[in-house]
Image (spheres, rainbow, N blue to C red):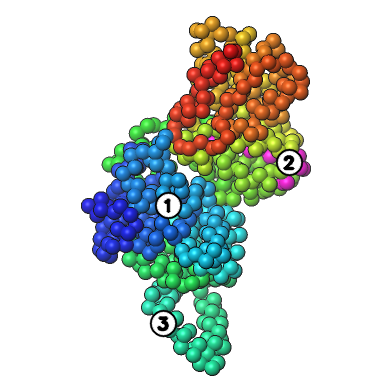
Amino acid sequence: MILETINSPADVKRLSEEDAVRLCQELRRFLVEQVSRTGGHLASNLGVVELTVAIHRVYDTASDRLVLDVGHQCYVHKALTGRRELFGTLRQFGGLSGFPKPYESVHDAFMAGHASDSVSVALGMARARTLLGAEYQVAAVIGDGALGGGLSFEGLNDAGGSGEPLVVILNDNGMSIDKNVGGLSKHLSRMRTEPEYYAFKKKYRKALEKLPAGRTLYEWSHELKTALKKSLLPPVSTVFEDMGFSYMGPVDGHDVQRLTAVLRAAREAGRPVLVHVHTVKGSGYEPALREPEKFHGVGAFDPATGQVQQPAQETFSHVFGETLRQLARQDGRVCAITAAMADGTGLTGFAGEFPRRFFDVGIAEGHGVAMAGGMAKQGLIPVFAVYDSFLQRGYDMLVQDMALEKLHGVLAVDRCGLVGADGETHHGCLDYLSQIPGMTVLAPASFAELRRMLRRAVLDMTTGPVAVRYPRGGEDGYDGDCGDEPVTVLRQGTDAAIVTYGILTGQALRAAELLEKEGVSLRVVKLNRVAPLDGDGICRALDGVKRVVAAEDQLRAGAVGERLGALLLERGAGIERYALRNAGEALPAQGSTAQLRHVLGLDAEGMAQAVREVLK
């Protein structure tokens, strides 16, 4: 097998054109085999096999800088840069990350877990190269979905006008650009991207520069050519060219020889170049071709059939989606917003039943929040379903376009806390929502509480933004329903108390059972509303207890534990020992949720140990 001989990009460069094609075939088989065991992002990686091989035939990523947008399509890159043998540990605790990580390899230029920033990052690297007098090349790969994010256009606008030599590779695996770029554009692009064409262009410019008026003649002919091209080409190419890019494409993203030639031409252009590449998500594996969304992020599956091994279980996302449909049937003002995550957030059913009240804004969370503000201002009830770590991009809009006007919009914040195998770029462990003035934050610990809290947030609360934050996956040992009150005592005890909320409630109750066997009476206090904190209710719930542990799956700074400690101190609650159990000072790496809780001391035994320590 050719793949077994590839230990670095240098080996890829030595391959003949025929062997490069065979390598792509072997890589697809390798991806299906490996991801079927560990789970991961399959469809997107199948789509960029030829593109990644071509990149490594043109660039030296040990010194050249390759920035991958989102980054989940990095599996082929990792397999070609000395990490093939580590794929058995993909996305597992202590194993190979599913995203680019510079601490893994010199070939990973930048940590990438979110979308739309690759052009900005690449431009920063290109400018650093110029200012420091270095000689490496810079390339960014961005998908057509990520291109919809506003940050990508900020980067393109600046990069095109900068004149810095860099290549932006647009990986277009959708249909939106396809209709705008016709056959004429494809024909002209094939002419413009031939290496021979660029060689002729250089010779033509050099020849004219030797003449007395050569420079003026070249500039005049260049302007004439540009005007003619703009009159013939459709807008999609000239948009990039108007920004200052040379546009190449569209190029067949599954023709490794053609891609290699085009990327070489782009690299040698000495200016900003955008290479438009058409790929097919899931290419080469029929189940992924049929259902690319299912195989975007998939668990372990049977590679022969594509059947997922573990059947789907009810999740908080699914319960949210079904509950919102019920609320929408009751009130015609209820609308749903998503940022390219309809299926992931449980809104597929809502979209089918209420298409006029469903809005997918693409990868544009800031826009989604601001739009929700406008909808709320004019009398609708917008519900924005979004992953916690993605909503961070809408922080400014949450303050400026919702909170300041006390607008009633609802944030259904999915994937809060530890999310598992996606690691530090996706954990929802920053408690930024509680810092926003006027924001109410509810934290259900069960499906029943999610239903109750969502109903309250949508139909009963009429002033100010409300966030209902819930974890990835399903329930964990607690299925009660006490969501009406801000604070609830779930279990009485006199020796000490654990204060917690959300999905860790089940772990706290199990910790109480462990300690009961040791003769320790532990009170379990559950916060149903984590912002604003109910000071009176908390003090009543902790009355008579002198030793307290606050447990949460958030980073320490500014989270509930710190705010709760300050509240108890200010009120003179008489707490003698107070300890925090949380996600620490830095976002954790990947691993199963159970493994991460254990390492952080947030499982039942970890919480019990924290109680033992405050009782010493």
Residue 460 located left or right of residue 517: right
Q: Nearer the viewer, residue 122 or 243?
A: 122
Q: Position of residue 178 (x, y in %)?
A: 46, 63
Mark toward the start of the polypeptide (1 vs 2) = 1
Tell me: 104 left or right of 428.
Answer: left
Q: Amino acid at mark 2?
A: Ala
Label 2 – label 3 distance at C-alpha: 59 Å
**Sequence order check: which comes first, mark 2 or mark 3?**
3
Q: Secondary structure at mark 3?
A: helix
Q: Residue at x 57, y 88 (%)?
A: 216
User: Is label 1 or label 2 in front?
Assistant: 1
Instruction: Residue type at mark 1: give it.
Output: Val
Q: Which one is in front in this view, the residue at disc 2 or the one at disc 3?
A: 3
State the residue at coordinates (34%, 42%). 86
Can residue 290 be seen in this snapshot? no
- Tell me what residue is drawn at x 44 percent, y 34 percent: 591
Find numbered disc 1 in the image and state the secondary structure of the residue it sits on: loop
Residue 203 versus residue 60 in the image, above or below:
below
Give me the disc on residue 403.
Answer: 2
Residue range in magenta is 400-415
Any part of residue 233 in sight: yes
Image height of 249 relative to 208, above or below? above
Q: Are marks 3 and 1 in contact (CB under 8 Å)?
A: no
Sort mark 1 into few (<14), some (14-19) or many (20+) by Cα contacts within 10 Å: some
- How crowded is the residue under tag 3: few (<14 C-alpha within 10 Å), some, or many (20+)? few
Question: Would you name the residue on which mark 3 appears?
Answer: 200
Q: Position of residue 464 (x, y in %)?
A: 73, 37
Q: Which residue is mark 1?
A: 106
Q: Nearer the viewer, residue 481 or 524?
A: 524
The quadrant the C terminus occupies is: top right
